[in-house]
Image (tube, coloured by chain):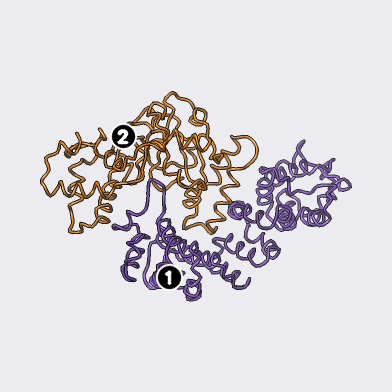
Amino acid sequence: MSQLADLNFDDLRTYVRDLLHERGPAGTDIDQFRQELPYHPLLRHYQQASDGLRDRLNRVGLALLEETAAETWPVESLHYLLTFIEEGRMESGIEALKSIVSSGAWLERPGGRQLQMLALRTLLGLGWLGDPNFWLRQGRLLAGEYPELIFRALVAHDVELAFEHLGEFAAWPAQAAHILRLYPSLIERHSLETVRALTSRAAAKLDPEVMIKIDAWFRQRGYGSIAPSVGENSKTQAEAESESWEPGGEHFRAAGRTSWDSAEAEDTWTLGTADPEQWAGALRDMVITPGAMDGARIPTILPTEAPF
Amino acid sequence: MPFKDLTLAPADQTLLDRFAAAVRLPDYRPVPGGPAAPDQVFDNIDRDPQIPDEADAGRPASRRDLLETLGGTEDDSEAGLIARGKSLCYSQVQKGTRKDDVTVLGHVHELDKLAGWLHDSASVLSLAETKTFLRDLLRMPGDESARLEEQKTSLAKNTLTRYQLWSFSTGDGREPFVALEPRRPLLLNRLGLGHLLADPMVELVVWSHTLPDGVPAHQPTAWDAGLENPWWRPTGRTEPLDGSGKESGFPEVIHNPIGPQDLATPITEVEP
């Protein structure tokens, strides 16, 4: 600690650069026994530093960030630098990151989308939100990779707005799995009821397999199903669910039908229950195994008993 | 054979004395309230029977190798000595005796370190969000096998750690955390995890795992233990912190990182 305080700016920059690249004597400061990553000792120094050393570490972080705009760093070292900046709350890095993002300095490099994502992730972590259109444009620049980043950014703006776009960001189950990684934090910030209602409201626009995946996530955690339920006290939630769980065109196409009307006209959709668990199971059968529409396993739905 | 059995030039002896002073930990006491043992790290290097005095092919680096490494440059500062000593340690991991008789192993990990590793260069979540995601996986209700499967699926990562893992076995085939109740004071004591005593706020998780093909286990040496771990002893067993001796410890091994698919029980939070 005192040794770091003794280093002049250039030597401190060299030390931090070497540490983040895990090389030289600086690299031995990473305690492998305790599974430290390169930014761990740096953050420890930073959090315990005097104002003077902290200020110099801030400036070193910024100088290295500017260095990476001109010089290619290994992606892992860059990730460690950005995590140091984000976890150290070095807001002075925001302008440099905005410049990197807007210039496409990293985006144009090999693996550029990942680098751009790291810059955007750090901006978001530092509290810079931009505006929703900025993030939607970035989503297009990233060519649909990292949709959960754009979703995360929109949530920071307006959680309802973000969920209006859920179908775009969770277009197939693998994408949904990434989006679901955000759900525990969303629930922590916005409550289970809100997140469930918003997801339920977005359900009509979701791919059926995505819906099943998300529904399974809720159920595995004992949060109930986001399939429709009867007798809910919450009017808002009931309204949200009635909007969301009307089977969409994709449900019927997957099941070999063209629409709700045609299915109803053929009188083959009868499910003699209002139990949401059974509804979810029936929909799952239809969606996952369209062949289940044949023969005895045809799920038939009586519209008069449907809980929609 | 310890350092005293080596034939040392006066300059080497001076170097060794300076190194011993550099790794000294004045406040370390093997038993709380007992006498201090500030030279424990040096003693571990000095007494580890797996470390030869002189270079010996197929064995870990020798004590003579340490001396040569320490004296290898003009930088004779204390920081330089420690950095070179650590470099030697990191270059000598898993050089101890292979242990092929291990089955299910137990491991204790810091939650923050696991979250830090999962928060990688491909992750869009913040560190805090990663930790919340992880906690959610750990706290999933329902039976253990469902939780284990969900963790295997959701921790889509090749390995659970960056560096080699320290693990313990029961030696009698029992599941590790059946033999050792996963409560914090018990874990810290029986496994000799003294480095975790200082901060009771560090959240811990445990898991048990098997080793995949191609990942052998080794008995740790003083090089694996490094220069900041006076709680370790070169006995092949964990050293309980209460001074009850190695017999109440467990056989310990080190091995390369394992992946989620190697988990035998789900990752579980440790009760305070």
Which residue is at a point 59% across and 35% down the rendered structure image?
B144
Res B40 → quadrant:
top left
* Chain A, colour shown: purple
Q: What residue is disc 2 on?
A: B234
Please name the amino acid that badge 1 sits on: Asp
The colour applied to the residues of chain B in this rendering is orange
Q: Nearer the viewer, residue A194 or B87?
A: B87
Taking depth in this image into account, of B203 and A282 the one nearest to the observer is B203
Determine contact: label 1, label 2, CB under 8 Å. no
Numbered disc 2: secondary structure:
loop
Q: Amino acid at mark 2?
A: Pro
> What residue sits 62% from the left and 60% below the top?
A169
Q: Residues within 10 Å of mark 2 (few under 14, many from 20)?
A: many
Which of the two residues, A269 or A231, is positioned nearer the viewer here? A231
Q: Which mark is residue A266?
A: none
Label 1 marks which chain's residue?
A
Place of residue B200 in the rendered image (x, y in percent of width and height, measured from the top left)? 50, 45
The disc placed on residue A55 is 1
Q: Residue furthest top?
A: B172
Image coordinates for residue B214, horizontal then vertical, percent: 37, 37
At a point 46% along the width and 58% down the height, the residue shown is B121
Q: Please indicate, yes or no, whether residue B226 appears anywhere in the rendered image.
A: yes
Disc 1 on helix, strand or loop? helix
